Amino acid sequence: MAAINEVIVAMVPFPDYSHLNQLFVLARFIASHNIQVHFLCFADENKDLKLRVQDDVRASNIHFDNLLRPSSPTEKDDRDGEPPILIYSSFKQTIPDIVDDDDDHEKLIKQMQDEFPMLEPHEKYCFQMELDDMEMQYSGEIINSCKEVEESHSYSSSNITRHDQCLEFLDKQDVNSVIFVSFGSTTTLSQEQVNEIALGLEQSNHRFIWVLRKGDNAEKLKEKDVKIELPEGFEERVEGRGIMVNWAPQLEILGHSSTGGFMSHCGWNSCIESISMGVPVATWPISFDQPFNAIFLTNLLKIGISVKSWSHRNEVITASTIEKSVKTLMGTIEGEEMRQRAVELSKQIKNSVRSGGLARKDMESFISHIIE
């Protein structure tokens, strides 16, 4: 076994699944280079993460600290003199209110170019290097993206358990025939909007998997506002053509040959997973950076269509609009052209993360930087 590098990496994710998961993927990559990684998180979340690496050869290099930082190099212990590196989640800029009437997105694209000249309105992981006097020196950013995505205007799927209901359903369908509908872990839709989505999916006559659940923030709302019901007779009418679940293995679904489209809130993790798997997107931004991401997909990468623009964020989208969006994405030449562009971009990304690829070289450069 190669010698352990004389650095310690402390990782402090924002306590939300989308942040935890992506930062943990990075932790495992760093640990694979024989670097000691301390993952600082809440106890229950650390417990779940431990299970994911219990049979992994990298597990011995990952240490789980329950909201505690690793011992300082100034303390007298067996790590005396080892330089620590701190990596933490950094929030993205959110959308302003100045584009309320911007249906064609020209103002928003201009703002994206002004504020993000490298087109980087995405997940950032900042890292800092510690000096002898314990002051922290800002050293750089790790962005959850790659040049192929940014310049065209890795995700590890190991240890993901096959979810029988969704994947058995997909196994029985034709190639590119199913649209996956999911609005992330924090979104709670109104009952009126749930009804419209249900009717829109039904009227589209396309096959679908719909993740229907209360968002993680639902407990902050009144119970009457978060109770989810489907239109009477809906489940019977779509039986065999669509399924509703409260959780789904998103990456496996997007990577399945039967999945041909993704209706999404456009969180950046969802965007990068959809792009990586070559699946076009019907965009429906809800909050935070999602309006930027949606326009990045539709207007710049041209691998998606807009179901709901940010300027109409307070409106209920009708069943007819949802039906039209699904039909366009799944059953037209326009939708097929988007799919082909997404597939080509997916090939570029997969080549980039392989040994010798640009993204792989960038990450290896980061490793070299922190162990110097």
Image (cartoon, helix red, strand yellow):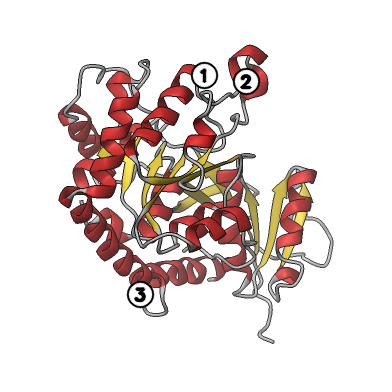
Q: Earlier in the sequence, mark 2 or mark 1?
A: 1
Q: Residue at x 49, y 63 (%)?
A: 171
Visible residue check, residue 271:
yes
**In this orientation, which residue lies closer to the viewer: 291 or 137?**
291
* Left or right side of 49 for 197: left
Query: How far separated are the C-alphas under marks 2 and 1?
Result: 8 Å
Q: Residue at x 62, y 23 (%)?
A: 218
Q: Residue at x 34, y 60 (%)?
A: 278
Q: Position of residue 57 (x, y in %)?
A: 70, 76
* Left or right side of 95 for 86: right
**In this orientation, which residue lies closer to the viewer: 313 or 248?**
248
Crowding near pointer 2: few (<14 within 10 Å), some, many (20+)? some
Q: Which element type, helix, strand or loop, lies under badge 1? A: helix
Callouts 2 and 1 close, C-beta under 8 Å: yes
Image quadrant in which the N terminus is located: bottom right
Q: Earlier in the sequence, mark 3 or mark 1?
A: 1
Quadrant in the rendering for residue 268? top left
Q: Earlier in the sequence, mark 2 or mark 3?
A: 2
> Which amino acid is tagged 3?
Gly
Q: Position of residue 155 (x, y in %)?
A: 49, 62
Write down the residue under mark 2: 227
> Which amino acid is tagged 2?
Lys
Crowding near pointer 1: few (<14 within 10 Å), some, many (20+)? some
* Left or right side of 99 for 169: right
Write down the residue under mark 1: 191
Is 194 drawn above or below residue 293 in the view shown? above
- Give the number of callouts: 3
Is 318 drawn above or below residue 236 in the view shown? above
Callouts 3 and 1 close, C-beta under 8 Å: no
Write down the residue under mark 3: 357
Q: Position of residue 180 (x, y in %)?
A: 43, 46
Seen as rendered, the residue at the extreme bottom is 1
